[in-house]
Amino acid sequence: MDENRLRSLLGLCRKAKCARFGHDAAIASIRFGKAQLCLLSADASERLETEFVRAAETFAKETPIAVIRLPMGMKEIGAATGLVSAVLTIDESGFAANIRKLLETSANPNETITMEENT
């Protein structure tokens, strides 16, 4: 996987105001149906992962929201976006599709966690 491309996409999402960073903002984005994709840092806790998988399952009405663990930690996310966070949501479908496609082509298929695998 091209980590530089992932960093660039995350930075562009922030500049385009298509990303919500932090627990409360990400939960609100999922609740109000804006989130297209939920991303967790590699060093996010299991409790946080469980909470967001449940939120995605509970509040996703029309299309399921994928919850994906990134291959980078909070500090790396912060370096790419300017905001250190363990969780973020992508609210624009084009960015979400590009990030998801990039992560699905990674060398390690165990990096991603989709709703279908957790139900």
Image (cartoon, grey):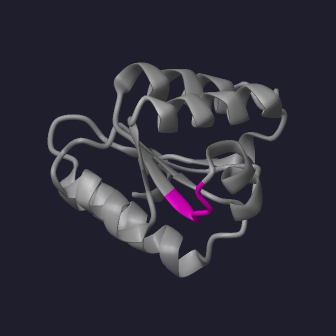
Quick one: 68 or 88, which is closer to the camera? 88
User: What stretch of residues is rendered in magenta?
Assistant: 83-87
Left or right: 34, with 94 as reference point:
left
Give percent across and percent down for residue 32: 15, 51
Please state, as top left, top right, bottom left or bottom right, where the C terminus lies in the image.
Answer: bottom left
Q: Predominant secondary structure in magenta?
A: loop
Q: Residue at x 73, y 40 (%)?
A: 109
Question: Is residue 12 left or right of 32 when viewed as pictured?
Answer: right
Residue 10 position, x and y percent, is 59, 36
**In the image, residue 6 lies at what x, y percent?**
70, 32
Q: Is residue 1 visible from the viewing direction of this image?
A: no
Along the line of sight, the residue nearer the viewer: 6 or 65? 6
Residue at left 41%, top 69%?
23
Q: Answer whether residue 66 is visible to the viewer in this image.
A: yes
Foreground: 109 or 87? Answer: 87
The location of residue 86, given as percent across then percent down, is: 58, 65
Q: Residue at x 82, y 27 (%)?
A: 2
Q: In front here: 117 or 43?
A: 43
Q: Is residue 99 above or below residue 40?
A: above
